[in-house]
Image (tube, grey):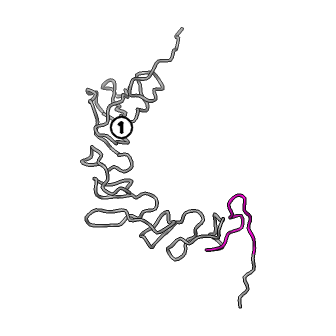
Amino acid sequence: EDERTCEACTEDCLICEKDSSQCSECKVGFGLFTYPRTDQQTDQVSVCVACGSANCKNCDHQSLSTIEVPLNVPCLACEPGFGLVDHSRCEKCTDPHCLDCHGSGNCTQCEVGFALLQDPAGNKCDPCGPACLSCHARDACVQCQEAYVLKGGACVACAPNCKNCSQSGPEACDMNGCYNGYGTKWKTVLGI
C-alpha cells in the first residue's frame, strides 16, 4: 500500500500539485520552463527558472526537445510601468504615468486619469481634466469619477452629498443617488 505524505515544493516554486518536483506556478521573478522528459514528448517536466530581467511579469517558456535547463529565460511581459526591450528585458517607462510601453519611451497605456497622446517622438500621458477618470485629451473626458457627470467633455459636480446625477445632470441628484445618510429632496423649479 502506498503511503502519501506532504513534501515542500522546490525552492522557487509557488504551487506544485502532482509531486514536489513538478511545479505548476512559480514565485515572482521566476518562469515555468516546461520540456519533455524523453524524446517521446508525452511526459512533461516543469521547473522554475529565473527570469532574465528584473520587473518581469511573465517569462514562462516551453521547449520541444529534451535540453539542459537554462539558468535564466528571456522575459515575455513586464510589470506595470515597464516596457519590454529587445524581446528579453524590462526597462522603466520614461513617462511616470505610463502603465505599459514598447521599449522604454513609447507609452501604450496610461494610468487612470491620463490620456495617451500620440507623438512621433514617443507616446506620452497627459492628465485629464478635473474629476475625469478616462479621456481622449485634457478637454475630452469620457468617464467621470463618482459625484460628477459628463457635460460637453468635462466633469461637472452633482448636488452636494450626491454620488450619482447621470440622469438629472449637474447640481442635481438622481433618485436613490444620494450617499448613505442622505435622501433625495424634490424641489420644483418654476420657469418665468
Examine the residues drawn in magenta and state their main secondary structure: loop
Residue located 71% across and 88% down the image: 191
Amino acid type at image mark 1: Asp
Please rate how many residues cluster around mark 1, counting C-alpha atoms within 10 Å: few if below 14, some from 14 to 19, many from 20: many
Residue located 49% across and 63% down the image: 133
Residue 186 lies left or right of residue 88; in this view the side is right
Which image quadrant is residue 150 in?
bottom right
Residue located 33% across and 30% down the image: 35
Residue 157 lies left or right of residue 119; in this view the side is right
* Number of numbered discs on residues: 1
Q: Which quarter of the rendered picture does the C terminus lie within?
A: bottom right
Pick whichever, 13 or 135, lies toward us.
Answer: 135
Pick whichever, 154 or 46, lies toward us.
Answer: 154
Pick whichever, 77 or 153, lies toward us.
Answer: 153
Q: In this picture, is 92 found above or below 120? A: above
Question: What x and y, as percent, mark residue 61?
Answer: 33, 37
Question: What x and y, as percent, mark residue 127?
Answer: 41, 65
Which structural element holds mark 1? loop
Q: Which residue is mark 1?
A: 60
Q: Quick one: which residue is furthest to the left in this view?
A: 86
Q: Quick one: which residue is furthest to the bottom in this view?
A: 192
Which image quadrant is residue 121 in?
bottom left
Residue located 36% across and 58% down the image: 108
Q: Which quarter of the rendered picture does the N terminus lie within?
A: top right
Q: Which residues are magenta?
A: 170-186
Question: What x and y, as percent, mark residue 185?
Answer: 75, 70
Magenta stretch encompasses residue 3: no
Pick whichever, 20 or 135, lies toward us.
Answer: 135
Question: What x and y, as percent, mark residue 170?
Answer: 61, 74
